[in-house]
């Protein structure tokens, strides 16, 4: 049996795929649609998409989809030959007839299709199949479900309406599954209502609450109002329904929502608990006071007992501090020899590590808000103090202005809406400050405002805090008593991660909307908003990346969770004002779900990841862009397990380190010029971020 493939150029096939969305009848990876605003937020993506999840959501609409990045691959039978249902030479959908079972089709639809489709309940992220499927013949449905790209290559479908803006990838179904679905579409003459949620006892409610807080709140918010992921508060969750929620949690969405069950992170029973929990009102979140912070403070080694000089001969400024997320550890490697120096315990779900201005101290923050202070001069390096300022946190930053080195540390909270300032040498809590909760555009007072990224100005005694939900950048003056918010600069809602331009004057932060993602440009010296740069769906630059482009001078760039795109924008308003703060290169990438990009002056390359891609193969890829041409050079797979995530250079820029994020994870080290593999370090559990001491202390990105 011969399987026909399209002979059209890939771009034409994708265009046709986009067009078929109007008549889309399948049940698999639809891209996100776009309901809600930002970040995933409504995104069409939905439902569960989240942070890291979703992180992403909105996926780019089209974008990977045609690629199979959506649910499709990877979801169906890995052994299924999609051409097996086709007649000789006539494409899919033929062959010996199979008798479909509508009851089996109904169960399959609930499990795999309701994340995007409904039957008789209206449009979700894709068409309502009670109306669309009934307009198609059983033969068409069989052909479409088996191999949509083949159908779209036929002349009859050349001019389909593309108003949906995205298309469904190959769902990866067996012939019997296709027959079951086709029979369901014919038999289901009334709306298919979602199943009732399971009744949760007190223990299950607590377990679901903890699952949500640990896996979902980072993207969707403590009160589920959205952020990087869409709004999934109880009213919205009830509309999605038990089936749609469980399907999304299980199989993910192309815009960055992970397939938690399919990837074996959650069980089906846990997905069912979460689907029920989301349809209940969110529980009231607890407070965390200054007294609570003081009570948490521990000094393991007093400053007077610490060494006055390094107690080892290693180049400690070239140490790599590698987060092992699940065990809550930081593994410290010698960047010069690649040897493991020591592993230290730092608490739950470590998120990032930041260096003090001198680099001597490293501060690790977990998602539980615990900050651990590591002295790199000790032999071996050790945790010398801990404190907690939040119940949930993502960022810390040290004071870096000359004269304030290593004096203060600020922790921004995801919950409660506050920041806490500590003594930089002991972590003694000095002040707890509530963040303003009114929005920059409507002055609405919100119940939840998260502090996302934080940077320290090299020229002023200020930290810049991204207040995600309100759209303000808050300048906290650490030279004043009480560490107040001295100025707020209104920018755009959903402010998330960001970093400095090459001069350290402009703070470039992502407004992580799925429908109107932008980079906001804050002039910290003049304390003004200079520009907002439209870039794509859910920009997620991390700290970003700065380099000299041969055509446009200094540039900065971001990748996106919601679509496969690297957006490069001019960042030299003095030397190249004609290109400043506008996209000068839009470089397509093979998949959505990117979290980080990285470069160094010593390397001719820019590196991007896509760990939140819903296709496991895409999530393992690293893509390489040539600075000289401004084009994608190639992509490669560092490891056959886990997800490739995050990059860091050694202090000279000669080597690049990449993480394989897996329970049996590894670090892969490359020559940053030739891209030859230098070394592979195994035996790590869920390695994610890596932070070179020199680069972190000096904001080298």
Image (spheres, helix red, strand yellow):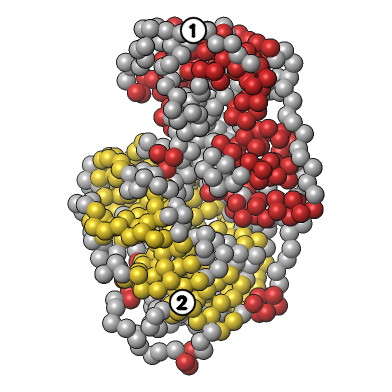
Point out the image quarter for the N terminus. Answer: top left
Q: Position of residue 184 (x, y in %)?
A: 65, 16
- The secondary structure type at the circle numbered 2 is strand
Q: Residue at x 79, y 42 (%)?
A: 199
127 relative position to 659: left or right = right
Q: Are marks 2 and 1 in contact (CB under 8 Å)?
A: no
Residue beneath disc 2: 374
Give 221 or 97, whichever is nearer the viewer. 97
266 relative position to 237: left or right = left
**Position above or below: 87 against 291:** above
**Position above or below: 334 against 149:** below
Q: Residue at x 70, y 19 (%)?
A: 120
Determine if residue 575 is in view: no
- The secondary structure type at the circle numbered 1 is loop
- Which label number is shown at residue 96? 1
**Lower position in the chain sequence, tag 2 or tag 1:** 1
Q: Position of residue 5 (x, y in %)?
A: 35, 16
Between marks 2 and 1 in the image, the one whose residue lies nearer the viewer:
1
């Amino acid at each position: 049996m011969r399987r026909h493939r399209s002979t059209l150029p890939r771009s034409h096939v994708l265009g046709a795929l986009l067009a078929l969305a109007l008549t889309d009848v399948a049940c698999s990876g639809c891209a996100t649609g776009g309901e809600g605003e930002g970040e995933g937020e409504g995104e069409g993506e939905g439902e569960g998409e989240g942070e890291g999840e979703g992180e992403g959501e909105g996926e780019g609409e089209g974008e990977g989809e045609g690629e199979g990045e959506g649910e499709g691959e990877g979801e169906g039978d890995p052994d299924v030959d999609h051409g097996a249902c086709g007649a000789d030479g006539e494409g899919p959908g033929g062959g010996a007839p199979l008798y479909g079972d509508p009851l089996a089709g109904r169960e399959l639809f609930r499990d795999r299709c309701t994340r995007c489709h409904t039957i008789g309940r209206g449009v979700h992220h894709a068409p309502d199949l009670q109306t669309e499927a009934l307009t198609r013949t059983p033969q068409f449905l069989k052909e479409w479900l088996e191999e949509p790209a083949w159908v779209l290559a036929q002349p009859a479908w050349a001019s389909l309406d593309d108003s949906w803006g995205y298309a469904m990838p190959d769902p990866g179904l067996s012939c019997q599954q296709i027959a079951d679905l086709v029979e369901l579409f014919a038999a289901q003459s009334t709306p298919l209502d979602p199943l009732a949620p399971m009744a949760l006892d007190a223990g299950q409610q607590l377990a679901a609450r903890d699952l949500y807080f640990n896996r979902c709140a980072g993207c969707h918010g403590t009160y589920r109002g959205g952020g990087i992921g869409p709004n999934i508060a109880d009213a919205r969750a009830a509309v999605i329904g038990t089936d749609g929620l469980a399907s999304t949690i299980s199989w993910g969405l192309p815009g960055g929502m992970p397939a938690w069950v399919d990837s074996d992170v959650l069980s089906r029973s846990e997905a069912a608990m979460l689907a029920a929990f989301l349809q209940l009102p969110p529980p009231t979140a607890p407070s965390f006071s200054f007294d609570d912070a003081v009570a948490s403070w521990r000094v393991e080694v007093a400053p007077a007992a610490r060494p006055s000089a390094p107690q080892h001969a290693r180049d400690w400024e070239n140490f790599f501090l590698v987060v092992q997320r699940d065990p809550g550890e930081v593994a410290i490697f010698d960047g010069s020899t690649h040897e493991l120096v020591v592993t230290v315990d730092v608490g739950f779900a470590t998120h990032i590590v930041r260096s003090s201005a001198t680099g001597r101290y490293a501060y690790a923050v977990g998602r539980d808000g615990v900050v651990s202070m590591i002295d790199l001069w000790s032999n071996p390096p050790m945790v010398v103090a801990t404190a907690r300022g939040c119940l949930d946190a993502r960022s810390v930053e040290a004071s870096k202005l000359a004269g304030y080195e290593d004096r203060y540390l600020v922790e921004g909270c995801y919950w409660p809406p506050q920041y806490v300032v500590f003594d930089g040498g002991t972590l003694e809590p000095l002040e707890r400050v509530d963040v303003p909760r009114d929005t920059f555009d409507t002055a609405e007072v919100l119940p939840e405002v998260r502090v996302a990224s934080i940077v320290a100005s090299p020229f002023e005694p200020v930290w810049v805090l991204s207040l995600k939900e309100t759209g303000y950048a808050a300048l906290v003056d650490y030279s004043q008593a009480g560490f107040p918010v001295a100025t707020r600069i209104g920018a755009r809602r959903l402010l998330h991660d960001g970093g400095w331009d090459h001069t350290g004057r402009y703070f470039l932060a992502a407004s992580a909307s799925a429908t109107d993602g932008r980079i906001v440009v804050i002039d910290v010296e003049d304390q003004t908003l200079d520009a907002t740069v439209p870039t794509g769906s859910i920009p997620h630059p991390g700290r970003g990346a700065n380099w000299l482009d041969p055509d446009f001078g200094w540039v900065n760039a971001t990748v996106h969770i919601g679509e496969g795109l690297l957006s490069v924008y001019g960042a030299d308003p003095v030397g190249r004002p004609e290109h400043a703060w506008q996209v000068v290169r839009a470089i397509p990438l093979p998949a959505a779900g990117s979290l980080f990009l990285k470069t160094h002056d010593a390397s001719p390359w820019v590196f991007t990841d896509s760990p939140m891609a819903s296709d496991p193969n895409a999530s393992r890829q690293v893509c390489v862009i040539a600075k000289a041409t401004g084009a994608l050079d190639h992509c490669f797979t560092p490891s056959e397990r886990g997800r490739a995530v995050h990059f860091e250079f050694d202090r000279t820029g000669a080597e690049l380190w990449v993480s394989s994020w897996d329970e049996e994870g590894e670090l892969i080290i490359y020559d940053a010029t030739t891209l030859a593999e230098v070394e592979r370090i195994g035996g790590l559990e869920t390695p994610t971020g890596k932070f070179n001491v020199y680069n972190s202390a000096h904001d080298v990105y």
